[in-house]
Image (tube, rainbow, N blue to C red):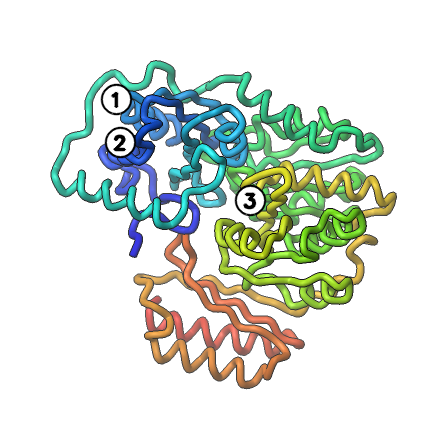
Amino acid sequence: MRRLFGTDGIRGVAGEFPLDDATVRSIGRALARHLGTHAKGKVVLGLDTRQSGAWIADALSAALAGTGVEVQSAGVIPTPAVAYLARSRGFAAGVVISASHNPWTDNGIKMFGGDGYKLADAVELEIEREIFAELAAGKEAAAGAGPKEPALPGNAALRAAYAEWLASVVRGQDLSGLHVMADCANGAATAVAGDVLRRAGVKVNLSHNHPSGKNINERCGALFPEVVAKEVVQRKASVGVSFDGDADRCLLADANGKVVNGDGILLLMARDMKQRGTLKNNTVVATTMSNMGLEVALGREGIKMLRAPVGDKYVLEEMQKAGANLGGEQSGHILFLEHATTGDGLLTALMVLATVARAGKPLHELIADLKVFPQTIKNVRVREKKPLEQVPQIVQAIAAAEKTLHGNGRVVVRYSGTEALCRVMVEAESEALMEQHADAIAAAVTKAVG
């Protein structure tokens, strides 16, 4: 069982294990050993806007450099940009210093292979074992002056290459009639969002694009999509886009100020891709958290929907098995495999904008028939992550809810892969029934492991 890697890399409080200086350096050396024959090659590195990002990146870079690996920093840049640069520029691997949607006090380390894909679970486990073995042996972190070049400000040419590639994906589409409000979450999107959208021909206004190192995700961005929704109405914009801290996902707002989540994006794009003959195997991969309403709407179009565990790496695995090229999560991680190897908030925004422009209709009209089952998600903070099937109180509460719902709703209870939380999701035909069962299960979780 993995102890360091969650569903999206290694995360924790910056300065504390596993993001203390010694462990960060051990992570760097373990990654270098994993690269093996590529150890004399290059690694591309990027980070978001957290105050701790620079010293973590520099410690990691120093450890890699100490083993003969050359590190090139792109500075502040979205996570998917590192994946793109790794596969397009011949890097042996890509590393991102970010904790995505977490508070500024947290940080994390994500790794991509030279092919631009996140590392497989088995590879992460192998690296993790090496880290713990080194720490157990009491090996001192190498001293030294650090990397030859600091992580910040990074190579502007790498950021420009990513922006140009994104703009090229929709080149030939006339997006000049669209006015977009883009909430950068005071995170990584601030480095490139304006450039990308303007290169694509969009009229854009940016908000929350003044990071301080401590205001990332602070009442803005994809965690608070209602903020950009209000701005859309105020400025009479066409579409609102809100990114998370590392810009690997986005949520939307239509011209009426209604938030559109990943389910709405998947429906919009699945229809468009099917119409254009580009939806492979007539299949979309969503997750256990996607609303039943999406499944019903796709079914009416003759499109098959598969469900994967939560985590875009697991969506990717299911897409590869099914031969699908469109998949994603309700949270706004959307994968377009014909273009990218991981979720990319800016790519998603551009694909949506191109679809809206082609249709000549506003966003809300294109997904007006998506009837969402009442759904709630309750987050319960836990002291331990004991397997849920081994906790009788929780098993009984889930069984009672499913018996009452009798197929006209869903229950999903799972631990977060990145935080000490248990997420209780309930869908039902009525809000009263939904709340009743969600409260009962959340109470059982609190009593047992909270």
Does dot 3 land on a helix, a strand or a loop?
loop
Apparent side of residue 415 relative to residue 385 in the rendered image (left or right): right
Residue bearing mark 3: 219
Q: Is residue 211 above or below residue 321?
A: above
Tell me if mark 2 has few (under 14), some (14-19) or many (20+) residues whose alpha carbon lies within 10 angstroms of its own.
many
Residue drawn at 43 percent across, 31 percent down: 94
Residue bearing mark 1: 66
Q: Is residue 354 above or below residue 443?
A: above
From the top left corner, tell me how far across and down residue 394 is, in percent.
Answer: 40, 76
Farthest residue in the left direction? 137
Check whether the beta carbons of the residues at disc 2 and disc 1 lie within 8 A of each other. Answer: yes
In front: label 3 or label 1? 1
Q: Which quadrant of the figure contains the C terminus?
A: bottom left
Quadrant of res 133? top left
Q: Is residue 74 above or below residue 420?
A: above
At label 1, the amino acid type is Gly
From the top left corner, tell me how far across and down residue 135 is, in percent.
Answer: 17, 40
Q: Nearer the viewer, residue 408 or 16?
A: 408
At label 3, the amino acid type is Arg
Residue drawn at 41 percent across, 32 percent down: 95
Tell me if mark 3 has few (under 14), some (14-19) or many (20+) residues whose alpha carbon lies within 10 angstroms of its own.
some
From the top left corner, tell me how far across and down residue 219 is, in percent.
Answer: 55, 44
Apparent side of residue 333 relative to residue 389 in the rendered image (left or right): right
Report whether residue 318 is seen. yes
Mark 2–mark 3 distance (CA, rounded to whole Å): 37 Å
Apparent side of residue 118 relative to residue 337 in the rendered image (left or right): left
Quadrant of res 307? bottom right
Residue drawn at 67 percent across, 55 percent down: 281
Q: Nearer the viewer, residue 256 or 164?
A: 164
Residue bearing mark 2: 29
